[in-house]
Image (cartoon, rainbow, N blue to C red):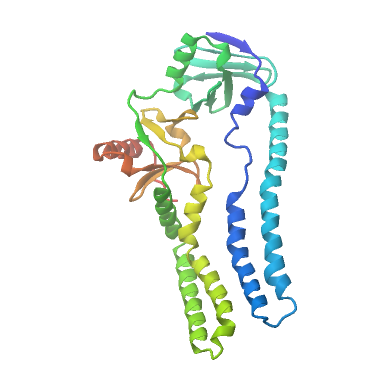
């Protein structure tokens, strides 16, 4: 089977649909957490006519300006970032993908030819494969091919899918939930940075105790009440960041990452599918794996991993996953 085609911009852009810039909700929420208590404190000082000519600007005007600026950037910044990202990808498309190319395959290999050269990859050497609504993307160790589905007939599409995704017929459903993500990330952070986190928590509790002591021993409790509340709130927010930050990060993450998925393990690699597409990764494309109490973590690099929560797998399935990972990947110490 051989097809000659010219990739369209829309087909190329489909590959990056999950990577386009989007509003940074997490930063704006963080600004609000800091700004709102400061504004409340400033209003309280103004109501009680506390001394200080710069109170309004320091505790009301400044935080309000910061909050408004954050909301404005939430609206405008993604548009600018999107324009720059599209311009960059458009330039990449024009340079490397807008010319005529050909793709052919059989039971043994796939071949991609373009002005930049010829890529001949046996199927066992396939590194990654992605199926999206309009394209297939195949990657070997020395290059990749983007193949639009419109140039293949139904029989060829079916055959290419079987060769590019060599997985068992049965797959297991799972999903990354907020609690699984928080528990795993919290344990990982404490494992890596236990001294810093322990010191920060002890120091924060000491400061909180000092604030409580000052307020309890102060003669003018009413006059300084809101000041101590603000100071205590800042300490509590900092101490509890390890609790609220990760769920907030999860809630503002991309929907595709949180979407229900199906997984299958094969001798050649890991298969995932969801409402957005199908994905195959050969075992050699992974950096390693680690098993924690709630999940199996399969690392694509030092900082990124697939989180397979054990709650979705029976004891027998967990044994099978563990056996496959131990046989195909090295244990990660990160």
Residue at the location (46% across, 43% down)?
Answer: 305
User: Can residue 108 be seen?
Assistant: no
Residue 159 at x, y = what percent? 45, 13
- Classify residue 60 by image quadrant: bottom right
**Is 53 left, or right, of 274 in this rendering?**
right
- Classify residue 174 by image quadrant: top left
Residue 173 at x, y = what percent? 36, 34
**Is 157 left, or right, of 223 in this rendering?**
left
The residue furthest right is 53
The residue furthest bottom is 219
Q: Nearer the viewer, residue 226 or 215?
A: 226
Residue 282 at x, y = what percent? 44, 30
Residue at the location (70% across, 18% down)?
Answer: 99
As displayed, is residue 7 above or below residue 208? above
User: Can residue 192 be seen?
Assistant: yes
How many numbered badges does the structure rendering display? 0
**Is 135 left, or right, of 295 in this rendering?**
right
Q: Nearer the viewer, residue 88 or 109?
A: 88
The residue furthest left is 316
Q: Which of 191 and 274 is in front in this view?
A: 274
As displayed, is residue 101 above or below residue 334? above
Residue 67 at x, y = what percent? 66, 59
As displayed, is residue 321 above or below residue 152? below
Residue at the location (56% across, 89% down)?
Answer: 220
């Amino acid at each position: 089977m051989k097809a000659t085609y010219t990739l369209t911009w829309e087909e190329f852009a489909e590959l990056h649909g999950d990577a386009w810039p989007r509003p940074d909700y997490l930063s704006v929420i963080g600004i609000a957490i800091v700004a709102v208590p400061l504004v409340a404190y400033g209003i309280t000082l103004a109501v009680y006519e506390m001394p200080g000519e710069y109170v309004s600007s320091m505790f009301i005007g400044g935080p309000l300006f910061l909050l408004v600026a954050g909301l404005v950037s939430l609206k405008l910044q993604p548009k600018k970032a999107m324009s720059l990202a599209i311009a960059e990808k458009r330039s990449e498309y024009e340079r490397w993908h807008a010319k005529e190319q050909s793709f052919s395959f059989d039971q043994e290999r796939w071949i991609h030819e373009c002005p930049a050269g010829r890529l001949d990859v046996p199927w066992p050497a396939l590194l990654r494969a992605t199926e999206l609504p309009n394209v297939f993307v195949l990657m070997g160790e020395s290059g990749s091919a983007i193949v639009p589905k419109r140039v293949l007939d139904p029989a060829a599409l079916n055959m290419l899918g079987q060769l590019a995704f060599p997985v068992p017929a049965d797959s297991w459903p799972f999903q990354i939930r907020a609690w699984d993500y928080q528990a795993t990330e919290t344990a990982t952070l404490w494992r890596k940075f236990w001294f810093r986190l322990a010191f920060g928590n002890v120091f924060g509790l000491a400061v909180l105790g000092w604030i409580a002591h000052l307020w309890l021993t102060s003669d003018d409790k009413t006059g300084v009440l809101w000041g101590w509340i603000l100071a205590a709130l800042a300490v509590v927010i900092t101490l509890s960041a390890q609790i609220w930050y990760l769920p907030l990060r999860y809630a503002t993450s991309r929907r595709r990452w949180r979407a229900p998925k199906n997984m299958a393990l094969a001798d050649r690699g890991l298969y995932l599918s969801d409402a957005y597409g199908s994905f195959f990764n050969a075992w050699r494309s992974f950096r390693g794996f680690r098993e924690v109490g709630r999940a199996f973590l399969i690392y694509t690099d030092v900082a990124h991993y697939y989180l397979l929560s054990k709650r979705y797998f029976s004891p027998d399935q967990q044994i099978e996953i563990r056996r496959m990972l131990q046989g195909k990947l090295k244990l990660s110490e990160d």
